[in-house]
């Protein structure tokens, strides 16, 4: 794709967002009735999305409750292939303290899957060499005999054509793991890779569930596997706004799991080793490597690739940096980095333009998912916030229009109906919480009450960082990888039962 075409695609999301918001403000003073009609139509559309959200969230919640009750190891054992499956777990780390790694390794060690079929790759950064070597030696001392292999890798700094971050670290670690796999003559088609955030606590049946999915899938080499991501490790210790953001992320993923035709990899996920080798491992110059890995496979196999949902949970930390203000900054930067997935549009458009074997409907579907998702992410909260502006202008103009007079009541009732999403979210949230350490009744009430912060968090930790990311891309001020700081007040929760 020529530079001009690439930049046009990069400019498009930000241009749509800013055009929408500025047009609403300007037309509110010039043609307030037009804006009122638009806002009502948008609110009806948003209410429809809320109803769909509630339905898909409930479906996923029921499936989650069913999956955690199943003995997956017992269920997979009648399948002859299961004992030949190897699991390779990648754990990239940078500036993480030993307590975080210890919790992750303890959960791996508590897994009920045979440990002699698990290989762990602990991937450090040369930029953090002293800390990594100290902590990795401590981890190896305690766990080196608990798995088939534990290997450590050190990603060199300043390699060409790379963005320092998780993707480039994983690329280096993947190639080092390949050396071990080739030396051990392990069959590529019998290896499943789990790429985890360093704070990921696996359910004790995660590997058994993943093995069952791999052994029973009609095309196991053409699909990734996405577990349910919870953020429960430190849920009782973090500020309320951080909990709302974390739980909202979980609920978004739950609605995506219920619709696998649009599902992409997110955060901690799994895929076949064969596919990983075929695509040349993780891309080194992209910020968000998780969902892009799904697109790498989709492109490599000319559209013949999917993501399979699993409702077995893995748990990570909510955003917490030791103080409220540092947590606010870190939370904003984390969402800004997630919103930077808008960078996918340009390379994906280029690949789709060149590959005519991918069905055009599939191309349009994924481009629409990215563009509509980024647009709604950035604009929805602001459109709802600005809905009162044209009403105020029309009232100042003493409009006698029936629409203007009835619009406040219509909008009020639409927003009341949309509150259904908050009520359902609060109920599902409480049902999925780990045991409270103390003052259980008070903490549960706080967990319910926190959802009244949702409108504010959608604005401050939703629309604003999304607009920030799109504006940076529009202006060519490219974002690098930012690592979320992890601070623990006490030992992380490891109960995912």
Image: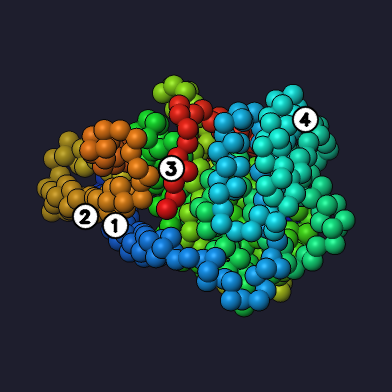
* Residue designated by label 3: 232
SS at mark 4?
Answer: helix
SS at mark 1?
Answer: helix
* Residue designated by label 2: 417
**Left or right of 166: which side holds 422?**
left
* Residue designated by label 4: 126
Earlier residue among tags 4 and 2: 4
Earlier residue among tags 1 and 2: 1
Q: How many residues crowd mark 1 within 10 Å: few (<14), some (14–19), many (20+)?
A: many
Q: Quadrant of residue 264?
A: bottom right
- Judge whether 491 appears above or below 178 on screen: above
Residue in the foreground of this view, choosing between 204 and 406: 204
| Residue displayed at 49% across by 46% down | 315
**Left or right of 423: which side holds 473?**
right
Q: Disc 4 to disc 3, how far (Cα)?
A: 30 Å
Residue in the foreground of this view, choosing between 256 and 37: 256
Earlier residue among tags 4 and 3: 4
* Residue designated by label 1: 47
Mark 1 and mark 3 residues within 8 Å of each other at the beta carbon: no
Mark 4 and mark 3 residues within 8 Å of each other at the beta carbon: no
Mark 1 and mark 2 residues within 8 Å of each other at the beta carbon: yes
**Left or right of 355: which side holds 218?**
left
Q: Nearer the viewer, mark 3 or mark 2?
A: 3
Q: Is residue 303 visible?
A: no
SS at mark 3?
Answer: loop
Q: Disc 4 to disc 1, how far (Cα)?
A: 49 Å
Mark 3 and mark 2 residues within 8 Å of each other at the beta carbon: no
């Amino acid at each position: 794709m020529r530079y001009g075409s690439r930049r046009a695609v990069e400019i498009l999301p930000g241009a749509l967002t800013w055009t929408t918001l500025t047009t609403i403000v300007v037309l509110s003073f010039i043609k307030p009735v037009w804006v009122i009609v638009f806002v009502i139509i948008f609110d009806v559309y948003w209410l429809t999305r809320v109803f769909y959200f509630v339905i898909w969230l409930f479906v996923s919640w029921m499936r989650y409750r069913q999956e955690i009750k199943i003995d997956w190891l017992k269920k997979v054992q009648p399948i002859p292939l299961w004992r030949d499956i190897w699991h390779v777990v990648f754990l990239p780390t940078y500036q993480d303290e030993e307590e975080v790694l210890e919790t992750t390794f303890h959960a791996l060690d508590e897994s009920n899957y045979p440990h002699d079929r698990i290989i762990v790759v602990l991937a450090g950064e040369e930029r953090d060499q002293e800390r990594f070597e100290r902590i990795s030696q401590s981890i190896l001392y305690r766990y080196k005999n608990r798995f088939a292999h534990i290997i450590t890798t050190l990603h060199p700094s300043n390699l060409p054509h790379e963005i320092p971050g998780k993707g480039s670290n994983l690329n280096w670690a993947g190639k080092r793991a390949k050396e071990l796999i080739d030396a051990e003559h392990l069959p590529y088609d019998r290896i499943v890779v789990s790429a985890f955030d360093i704070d990921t606590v696996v359910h004790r049946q995660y590997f058994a569930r993943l093995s069952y999915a791999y052994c029973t899938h009609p095309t196991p080499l053409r699909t990734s596997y996405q577990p349910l991501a919870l953020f429960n490790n430190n849920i009782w210790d973090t500020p309320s706004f951080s909990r709302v953001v974390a739980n909202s992320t979980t609920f978004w993923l739950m609605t995506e799991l219920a619709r696998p035709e649009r599902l992409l990899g997110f955060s901690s996920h799994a895929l076949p080793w064969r596919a990983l080798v075929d695509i040349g491992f993780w891309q080194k110059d992209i910020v968000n490597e998780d969902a892009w890995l799904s697109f790498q496979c989709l492109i490599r196999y000319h559209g013949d690739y999917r993501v399979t949902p699993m409702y077995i949970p893995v748990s990570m930390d909510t955003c917490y940096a030791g103080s409220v203000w540092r947590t606010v900054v870190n939370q904003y930067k984390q969402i800004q980095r997630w919103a930077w997935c808008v960078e996918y549009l340009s390379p994906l458009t280029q690949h789709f333009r060149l590959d005519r074997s991918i069905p055009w409907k599939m191309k349009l579907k994924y481009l629409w998912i990215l563009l509509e998702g980024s647009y709604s992410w950035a604009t929805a909260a602001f459109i709802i916030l600005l809905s009162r502006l044209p009403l105020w202008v029309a009232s100042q103009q003493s409009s006698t229009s029936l629409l203007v007079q009835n619009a406040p009541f219509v909008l009020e009732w639409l927003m009341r109906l949309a509150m259904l999403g908050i009520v359902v979210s609060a109920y599902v949230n409480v049902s999925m919480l780990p045991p409270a350490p103390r003052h259980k009744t008070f903490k549960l009430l706080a967990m319910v009450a926190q959802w009244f912060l949702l409108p504010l968090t959608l604005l401050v930790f939703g629309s604003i960082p999304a607009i920030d990311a799109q504006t940076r891309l529009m202006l060519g001020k490219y974002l690098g990888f930012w690592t979320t700081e992890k601070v623990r007040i006490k030992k992380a929760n490891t109960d995912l039962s």
